[in-house]
Image (cartoon, rainbow, N blue to C red):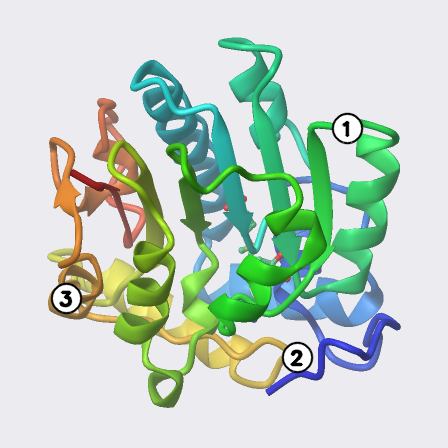
Amino acid sequence: MTRVSDAMPDTDRPNAARIYDYMLGGAHHFAVDRAAAAQMLERFPDAARAGHANRDFLRRAVEFCCARGIRQFLDLGSGIPTVGNVHEVARRHDPDVRVAYVDIEPVAIAYSREVIGDDPLVTVTRADLRRPQDVLAAPGVAGLLDRSAPVAVLAVASLHYVAPEDGLTAVVAAYRAALVPGSAFVMSHGSDDVDDEDAAAHIRELAEVMRHSATPAYVRTRAELLDALAPFELADPGLVDIRRWRAESDLPDAAVYGAVGLVR
Ligand SMILES: C[S@@+](CC[C@H](N)C(=O)[O-])C[C@H]1O[C@@H](n2cnc3c(N)ncnc32)[C@H](O)[C@@H]1O
């Protein structure tokens, strides 16, 4: 497991935050990240578009949570800031929204702090999402979010980095235990358990490239994802491809499932 105290970026190995930033057209990546992204695009030409589809899903899910009255967000694996950051989307509904961003990647943390500046309602914390108690107790999270009121936990394209031996179900259950009724858990996750065989093969190859990175990634079956989401009541339309979660699209499935779990 990566040591959270290592605050220098690892420039020898590619990293999820920086590869994703490259795919989205950002400027915060190193040569190793671009090389890994090129390998991915060769194997999975739709990877960049799937990244944009994921950001669209994130935006729709945040808007959905805001429409339900949620005013606090804990964004796990928030990444390098790009268009449509959570606090920007949520503030269109209410300027007093609170957002706690959490990531493990030093470049993502440094740039997030630069972008956010001095904002009393937004924090940026370097922590490991696989350690829920550490995340929840971190000053940037515990000091910002009022856990007696609803919170939306966002785990958007960030649970791939929970290894099978770390236990996804236990990690999700630990966050669920911290939420009061009215809260939500937003998840998107790559899967090779999809109808389109090409997309399934592509996403397996993408995980294979990531296996050699600083942040190894794992794809999961639909049943495994539903199992992790079992503590929640899924909002319509349930766990579906991100391109079809409360949206219509002519494009093929992204091989990434998305869902919003509600705490009743
Ligand atoms: C594919 S990006 C997703 C970014 C953003 N959530 C989105 O959907 O646009 C995955 C992010 O998870 C972060 N990450 C990976 N492992 C992590 C861990 N153990 N704890 C916290 N963040 C992690 C990476 O650094 C990266 O920023």
- The image shows residue 53, relative to residue 185, as above or below, that is above
> Which of 151 and 101 lies nearest the eye of the viewer?
151
Where 5 sits versus 257, above or below? below
**Which residue does the image show at 42% across and 68% down from the upper left?**
160
* Residue under pointer 3: 227
Is 249 displayed left or right of 102 in the figure? left
Where is residue 130? Give x, y as percent: 49, 73
Q: Position of residue 171 (x, y in %)?
A: 37, 70
The number of callouts visible is 3
Which marked residue is nearer to the observer: mark 1 or mark 2? 1
Under mark 3, the amino acid is Asp
- The Cα atoms of the two marked residues, 1 and 2, are separated by 32 Å
Q: Residue at x 42, y 45 (%)?
A: 153
Q: Amino acid at mark 2?
A: Ala
Residue 215 placement: quadrant: bottom right
Amino acid at pointer 1: Pro
Q: The N terminus lies in which quarter of the figure?
A: bottom right
Q: Earlier in the sequence, mark 1 or mark 3?
A: 1
Secondary structure of the residue carrying tag 2 is loop
- Residue at image mark 2: 214
Residue at (77, 43) in percent of width and height: 112
Is residue 46 visible in the rendered structure shown here? no
Above or below, 79 relative to 61: below
